[in-house]
Amino acid sequence: MSEYKIALTGVTYRYSPDTPYETRALDNVSVGFESGKITGVIGHTGSGKSTLIQMLNGLLKPDSGEVTLDGADIWANPKKISSVRFKVGMVMQYPEYQLFEETVRKDIAFGPQNMGMNEDEVKKAVEDAAAVVGLTEEQLEKSPFDLSGGQKRRAAIAGIMAMKPEVLVLDEPAAGLDPEGRESILNAVEKYRNETGATVIIVSHSMEDMARRCDNIVVMSHSKIILNGKCDEVFTNSEKLTDAGLDIPQITRLMMLLRSKGVDVDSKIYTVDRAEQALLKLFAEREATR
Amino acid sequence: MKSISLGQYYASGSILHKLDPRTKVLLGMLYIVCTFLCKNIIAFGLLFLSGILLIAIAKIPFKIILRSLRPIIFIMLFTVVINVFWTTGDRLLFSWSFINIYAEGLYNALFMAIRIIMLITGTSLFLTYTTTPIQLTDAIERLLAPLKRIKVPVHEFSMMMTIALRFVPTLIDETERIMSAQKARGADFSNGSLVKRAKALIPILVPLFVSAFRRADELATAMECRCYHGGEGRTKMTVTRMQGSDITALFAMIVFGTVIVLINYYAAKYGIGYTM
């Protein structure tokens, strides 16, 4: 387990325990997230994804089981949980609704200030984070409520990145944005990982986004983890994905269809780029044999 | 935050659930009157039994009722203490310097405790555990309908209530979400001086108000898009009608009230038990 930055061992969690509304959100879940890698968590609505990631920074406390960060139980000393929250940065769903300060700069500075950084450090942290997400100097001085939807989202994410977390957790970071907005957010996340070597965990519905950005994929269904592995291992396991009520990436489906029609392509392809290469190669071979 | 129980609806499909919501509003009001009519120990005993009977009829677990009583423990203790120490009577039980405890005081304290418990249990049984908020505001609108004649905006009033009730859970969820988000950024709500803690609320309140206004705006637009223009000529999807069971229930409640009045009267006349 040592190569894992953060891991869950046998974690169970129930909502509204001992009432008629009791629901089991996590059922004996064990999973590790590799250091410095981007891991995607996918699953149907209500499969327990959001609960899982709220375990990671101690917003929820497991009923049983253990959450370990760098091999140490984060609940060993409940009073020190805030230090865990500084190491594990969490971007919730629709983070733009948490903006509250007069200017974007002040809002991004909220986290670093809570960490007790001095003024110069805060200033630098804010500017670094703004650069990663692509907010201009001019936008930093605006009111967060005057920004566009995508800009607000980026400002909110910068607010977490400014705390320089070693683990960055994002819940549906690209939900409800146009393709351009999605790209810029996901690029910013990748850039943050490349610059700081942080461990990144992204929850998403979009197979295509995940397929392109992630190193590892964890698939959840009915409060359990049903698949966990490298992208190609997971995305080509169409049977289990369909069982979980999920789609395989469109491009993989296309490749499988082509293969079933007798075209000799690799059905393990899950990104458009690789599909393009494979098809071009195929055409080149055909040209040559003609 | 989730444990806030304003007596939430509890679906158990009992006879009480199936009564017309208007009947339940009237029953609730009559029950309040009954709790205040009680004067004699026998009447209070009867009131207590009626409460237990109602809980059984409504098929609500006892645990849930007890939980709803938790917030009023302080008020109850306060009344009990006041009654025990400040009631004067004939039968002195205990006396020490300025403290005099009379048997009447103990009785009164017990009566007040039963009265408060039954007040809360009774009303929440009729109005919240067995009636959904929507049914309730609908019933109020229809009961108050005669006031429309004198230009009271009954429909608007009930629509406002419906919307307010509808958004209570939404706003609680929203508050929780914002609190989690700010906690993730290192906000601390539970430590520090009073001023510091009040200041710590700003990161919650600003986003909460912003989202409440946004929701209100969206809701207004959505309602206008569906041609909402007030109560005039508006029909209901489900129109409940008074049935035999409603009449029976109301009749039973009136009989119950009459019995209590009679017990008070005859018990006082013949000096049975203690009368406050």
Image (cartoon, coloured by chain):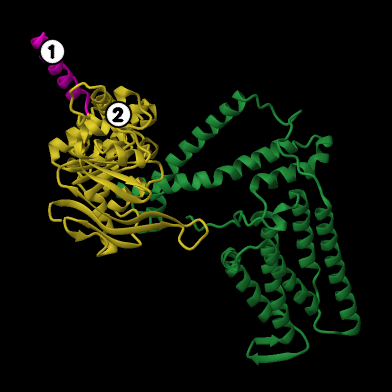
Question: How many C-alpha atoms fall within 10 Å of the one at disc 2: few (<14), some, or many (≥20)?
Answer: few
Q: Is residue B103 above or below residue A32?
A: below
Instruction: Count the labels in the image.
Output: 2
- Could you say whether the residue bearing mark 2 is in a helix, strand or loop? loop
Q: Residues within 10 Å of mark 1 (few under 14, many from 20)?
A: few
> Disc 1 marks which amino acid?
Arg
Place residue A229 in its image quadrant.
Answer: top left
User: Which shade is chain A?
Assistant: yellow
- Of residue B141 and residue A37, the one placed in the foreground of this image is A37
**For the residues carrying marks 2 and 1, which lies nearer the camera in this image?**
1
Magenta: main secondary structure equals helix
Classify residue B106 as left or right of residue A182: right
Does A284 appear in magenta?
yes
Q: Position of residue B11 (x, y in %)?
A: 61, 54
Chain identifier, green in the render: B
Q: Is residue B249 magenta?
A: no
Residue that carries the numbered disc 1 in the rendered image: A286
In screen coordinates, is B68 left or right of A194? right
**SS for tag 1?**
helix
Tag shown at residue A141: 2
Magenta part of the chain: A271-290
Q: Nearer the viewer, residue B202 or A155?
A: A155
Q: Is residue A171 visible?
A: no
Q: Chain of mark 1?
A: A
Amino acid under disc 2 = Glu
